[in-house]
Amino acid sequence: MADDALFEFLHMEIVAHVYKEQATREDIDKERVTCVSTLEAMGFRVGQGLIERFTKDCPTFKDDLDVMKFLCKDFWSTVFKKQIDNLRTNHQGTYVLQDNKFALLTQFSSGKQYLEEAPKYLAFSCGLIRGALSNLGLESVVTAEVSLMPSCKFQVVIQKL
């Protein structure tokens, strides 16, 4: 239980530090893009490392859907202490992962009060997913959307090479 709180606090402080560091520079729009990119890159590297560790004793996956199921069940459970609530796909390389009580958003008020602040707290997680998939051989684009806190949806589009 304590490690969850520490992870959430560390995440909030990393986001605050990245945004504070950029606040001394250039204009606001460029700052926001730079901060999101920085946080996403951090998550990418962490995702690569974690998935390598989690899959060392696993058999190989037979297709993209197996990889996504592993990500939603085992990977998500290890990182956020719960499984993804819903996984949807169009069977053409697009997946939607829905978490109805996303751990990194639960410290905020429920509802729409802090909705405009949510994207900066999701950039790391988008990178985490993208990094994990990258290390499993799937290049992807990951975006996040929040319509009502603390619920969020991650859209994963697998890039066909």
Image: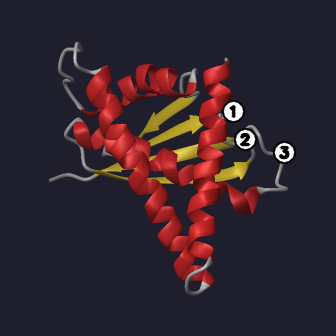
> What is the secondary structure assignment of the residue under circle 3?
loop
128 to the left or right of 114: left
Three-letter amino acid code at the position of disc 2: Pro
Three-letter amino acid code at the position of disc 1: Lys
Where is residue 141, by image quadrant? bottom left
Which numbered disc flags the more N-terminal residue, 1 or 2? 1
> What is the secondary structure assignment of the residue under circle 1?
loop
Q: Residue at x 23, y 35 (%)?
A: 136
Where is residue 100, by image quadrant? top right
**Crowd band around label 3 with a 10 angstrom C-alpha radius: few (<14), some (14–19), many (20+):** few
**Crowd band around label 1 with a 10 angstrom C-alpha radius: few (<14), some (14–19), many (20+):** some
Three-letter amino acid code at the position of disc 3: Ser
Q: Quadrant of the N terminus?
A: top right
Where is residue 17, by image quadrant? bottom right
Q: Is residue 131 visible?
A: yes
Q: Nearer the viewer, residue 118 or 61?
A: 118
Q: Is residue 145 visible?
A: no
Q: Residue at x 50, y 45 (%)?
A: 125
The residue that mark 3 highlights is 109
Question: Looking at the picture, does residue 158 appear above or below residue 34?
Answer: above
Question: What is the C-alpha distance between the residues marked 1 and 2?
Answer: 5 Å
The residue that mark 2 highlights is 150
